[in-house]
């Protein structure tokens, strides 16, 4: 069902149709934000895993922006606002514990969410490990700085070795923090979550989801 977080940001909240939720999960979408792809994903994750899932929009009030405009204005996003919505989404699940996962820009904010210490486990799908130059802004802190203020060992990062958004030297810095990294050979950015993308790799995507599901099902 569609809800509004306390900030006014639109979100989609899905509880499993039968039985009690085993955990809560917050999903931060890619740069294109909350859309049917992520509404369907929330429903699928809720039913398959018996989780309560809440996914929220990254560009509240600007849902009609095209991808070029979103990329150009990413520097105007504020960590306080995005992470505040992430914590509010966790509360909306009414669960304990609550994990968080995100894709692309959402994956970058998943790394930053470690600093909130609200989530027991974090899974970043090809999230930027350093803020890209074109996204630099006053409200954008570096992911690794925020990650180190929490527990890096709570992080699973899923990455493709052909992804220019997560170059090898950035990946090494992430590994040095103690985060777990799973890297897929011959995989590029966005290879998991959207089957319509040319980069999609169904075999690797299936394995990546298996890795993520196991990560959230581990005891804290």
Image (cartoon, helix red, strand yellow):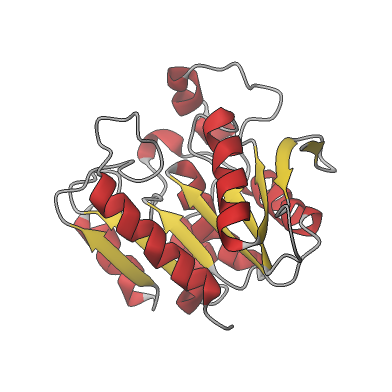
Q: Position of residue 61 (x, y in %)?
A: 71, 23
Q: Position of residue 1 (x, y in %)?
A: 76, 38
Q: Residue furthest left?
A: 186
Residue 202 sits in which quadrant?
A: top left
Does residue 16 appear to the left or right of 166 in the view shown? right
Q: Residue furthest bottom?
A: 219
Pick the front one: 66 or 220: 220
Pick the front one: 188 or 25: 25
Is residue 115 depicted above or below 65 in this figure? below
Q: Residue furthest right?
A: 6
Residue 211 sits in which quadrant?
A: bottom left
Q: Position of residue 72 (x, y in %)?
A: 46, 24
Q: Residue furthest front?
A: 18
Q: Position of residue 149 (x, y in %)?
A: 56, 72
Count of number-bearing discs: 0
Pick the front one: 90 or 139: 90
The answer to whether one can see residue 46 in this image is yes
| Residue drawn at x 29%, y 42% as measured from the top left | 189
| Residue drawn at x 61%, y 36% as measured from the top left | 39
The quarter of the rendered structure image containing the C terminus is: bottom right
Is residue 1 depicted above or below 131 in this figure? above
The answer to whether one can see residue 148 in this image is no
| Residue drawn at x 18%, y 47% as measured from the top left | 162
| Residue drawn at x 51%, y 46% as measured from the top left | 106
Residue 78 sits in which quadrant?
A: top right
Does residue 96 appear to the left or right of 127 in the view shown? right
């Amino acid at each position: 069902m569609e809800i509004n977080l306390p900030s006014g940001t639109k979100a989609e909240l899905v509880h499993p149709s039968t039985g009690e939720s085993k955990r809560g999960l917050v999903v931060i979408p890619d740069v294109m934000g909350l859309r049917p792809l992520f509404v369907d994903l929330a429903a699928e994750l809720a039913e398959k895993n018996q989780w309560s899932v809440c996914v929220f929009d990254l560009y509240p009030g600007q849902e009609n922006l095209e991808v070029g405009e979103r990329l150009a204005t990413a520097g105007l996003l504020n960590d306080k606002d995005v992470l505040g919505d992430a914590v509010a989404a966790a509360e909306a699940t009414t669960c304990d514990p609550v994990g968080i996962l995100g894709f692309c820009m959402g994956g970058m904010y998943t790394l930053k969410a470690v600093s909130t210490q609200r989530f027991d486990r974090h899974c970043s799908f090809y999230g930027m490990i350093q803020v890209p130059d074109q996204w630099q802004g006053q409200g954008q802190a570096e992911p690794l700085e925020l990650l180190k203020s929490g527990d890096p060992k709570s992080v699973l990062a899923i990455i493709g070795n052909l992804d220019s958004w997560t170059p090898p030297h950035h990946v090494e810095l992430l590994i040095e923090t103690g985060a777990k990294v799973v890297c897929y050979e011959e995989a590029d950015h966005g290879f998991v979550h959207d089957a319509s993308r040319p980069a999609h790799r169904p075999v690797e995507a299936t394995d990546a989801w298996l890795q993520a599901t196991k990560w959230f099902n581990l005891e804290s």
